[in-house]
């Protein structure tokens, strides 16, 4: 149920993140488009003012003809005037004859009006909108009057007062349209990303679940197979009659039944929150080490399993589950020794540091490279041809989630073995109660 809730929260988080990105993108691009629209309006107003300026300057230039100015100049020369005064008047007449300076008009016409300095579509019409007199950035075959009416739905027209009251109609620039469309494109991309992420997450989750179910089934068969095989052997021995001591067979059968009980207890507790109690670590490690020693293959190089842990070292444990962790580490170490010349040694050491119990499990197997060490705890990952990649994954789940500890690959290198590190919460040493005095 917890995994299902976590998955649901992750999916909901993806959707909320996509919505937040979309809303933020819409708000930002809308603000950006509004600012660009204001700049476009200023550009159109500048264009309209340039046309008005050109019209006004042209109107001022249309004055009296050259013969009038020549007559005025002759009258000034014929008059009885001070020479300095006469020269000044003649200079003024020459200036008026030439008309106003054309530098400003040439600049406005050549730099603003004539070239296509603005990408904003615009149409100039008369006041009654019966004819179009000028257009910019519109298709040549467009209906200018219809286009001007469409533009008025977007922006109110600008009136050119000095140009016969004509109207400038303008729309949005291509850049403004792109900015307004951008958030919708971005939303589509984000939605596609969320969809792909959701599908990928669901696929990975289903794949891990499939690997987990298969691995759990194989692990259960493996855990149950060893004691069941042993019990079948003892039963066959009993059928031989006097070939075996009944008391010895009964003890061994009792051990196998206890092993089956522990296996059932492990699988029962793996799906619930187990109780943790202060427990000496050394007896737990010795029990698992003795169990593995009896199952070390005798055909290969000799293997020594040594436990060097202080008797007082105590941690908060669930014994059944923690034995499973150590058992998986020791089996993993034995598998890593296959094909490697011996003799071999597995060393379990432990100490207490800063209120934590630190255990190290070292082996002399083939070791791992860094890439393998990063993935050994992932469900379904295995370097063995017939492995199912669940032992170390279960070990991490038991240590990290159930014991609030940590299990990592402390060191490893190809050909140099591997060292796994377990960190657990330390507990006060268990003190056996003193026996009650007896009255004699």
Image (cartoon, rainbow, N blue to C red):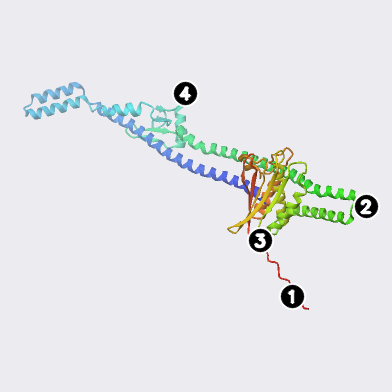
Q: Nearer the viewer, residue 49 or 422?
A: 422
Question: Could you tell me which secondary element the residue under label 2 belongs to?
Answer: loop
- Say which label, 1 or 3, has the lower sequence index: 3
Q: On screen, 144 above or below 217?
A: above
Question: Residue 237: horizontal and vertical position, in percent?
Answer: 89, 49
How many angstroms separate mark 2 from mark 1 (CA)?
48 Å
- Farthest residue to the right: give it: 241
Extreme residue in the bottom direction: 440
N-term-proximal mark, 2 vs 4: 4
Extreme residue in the top direction:
67
Q: Residues within 10 Å of mark 3 (few under 14, many from 20)?
A: some
Instruction: Determine the CA span between mark 2 and mark 3.
Output: 46 Å
Q: Residue at x 82, y 53 (%)?
A: 256
Residue at screen point 57% across, 37% down: 189
Q: Nearer the viewer, mark 2 or mark 3?
A: 2
Please provide percent x and percent y for residue 282: 69, 57
Q: Which residue is mark 1?
A: 437
Determine which of the numbered discs, if any, sits on residue 141 in the image: 4
**Residue picked out by circle 2:** 242
Q: Earlier in the sequence, mark 2 or mark 1?
A: 2
Which of 432 and 264 lies nearest the eye of the viewer?
Answer: 432
Front: mark 1 or 4: 1
In this picture, residue 226 sits left or right of residue 341: right
Q: Of marks 1 and 4, which one's residue comes earlier in the chain?
A: 4
Q: Tell me the crowding category of disc 2: few under 14, some 14 to 19, or many 20 or more residues within 10 angstroms, Cα based.
A: few
């Amino acid at each position: 149920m917890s995994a299902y809730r976590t998955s649901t929260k992750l999916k909901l988080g993806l959707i909320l993140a996509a919505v937040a990105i979309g809303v933020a993108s819409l708000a930002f691009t809308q603000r950006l488009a509004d600012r660009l629209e204001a700049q476009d309006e200023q550009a159109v107003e500048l264009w309209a003012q340039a046309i008005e300026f050109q019209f006004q300057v042209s109107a001022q230039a249309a004055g009296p003809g050259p013969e009038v100015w020549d007559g005025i100049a002759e009258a000034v020369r014929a008059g009885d005037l001070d020479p300095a005064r006469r020269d000044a008047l003649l200079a003024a007449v020459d200036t008026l004859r030439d008309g106003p300076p054309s530098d400003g008009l040439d600049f406005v016409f050549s730099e603003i009006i004539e070239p296509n300095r603005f990408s904003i579509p615009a149409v100039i019409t008369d006041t009654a909108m019966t004819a179009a007199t000028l257009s910019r950035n519109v298709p040549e075959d467009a209906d200018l009057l219809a286009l001007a009416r469409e533009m008025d739905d977007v922006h109110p027209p600008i009136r050119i007062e000095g140009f016969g009251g004509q109207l400038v109609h303008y729309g949005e620039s291509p850049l403004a349209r792109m900015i307004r469309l951008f958030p919708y494109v971005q939303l589509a991309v984000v939605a596609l990303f969320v969809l792909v992420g959701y599908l990928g997450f669901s696929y990975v989750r289903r794949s891990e679940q499939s690997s987990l179910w298969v691995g759990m089934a194989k692990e259960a068969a493996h855990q149950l197979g060893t004691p069941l095989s042993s019990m079948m052997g003892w039963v066959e021995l009993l059928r031989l009659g006097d070939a075996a001591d009944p008391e010895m067979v009964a003890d061994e059968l009792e051990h196998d039944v206890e092993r089956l009980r522990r296996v059932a207890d492990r699988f029962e507790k793996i799906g619930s929150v187990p109780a943790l109690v202060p427990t000496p670590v050394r007896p737990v490690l010795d029990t698992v080490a003795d169990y593995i020693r009896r199952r070390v293959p005798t055909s290969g190089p000799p293997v020594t399993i040594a436990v060097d842990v202080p008797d007082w070292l105590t941690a908060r444990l669930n014994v059944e589950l923690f034995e499973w962790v150590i058992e998986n580490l020791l089996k993993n170490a034995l598998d890593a020794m296959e094909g490697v010349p011996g003799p071999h040694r597995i060393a379990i050491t432990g100490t207490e540091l800063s209120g934590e119990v630190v255990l190290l499990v070292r082996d002399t197997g083939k070791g791992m490279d860094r890439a393998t060490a990063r993935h050994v705890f992932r469900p379904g990952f295995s370097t063995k041809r017939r492995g199912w990649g669940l032992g170390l994954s279960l070990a991490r789940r038991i240590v990290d989630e159930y014991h609030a500890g940590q299990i990592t690959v402390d060191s490893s290198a190809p050909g140099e073995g591997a060292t796994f590190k377990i960190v657990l919460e330390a507990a006060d040493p268990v003190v056996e109660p003193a026996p009650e005095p007896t009255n004699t």
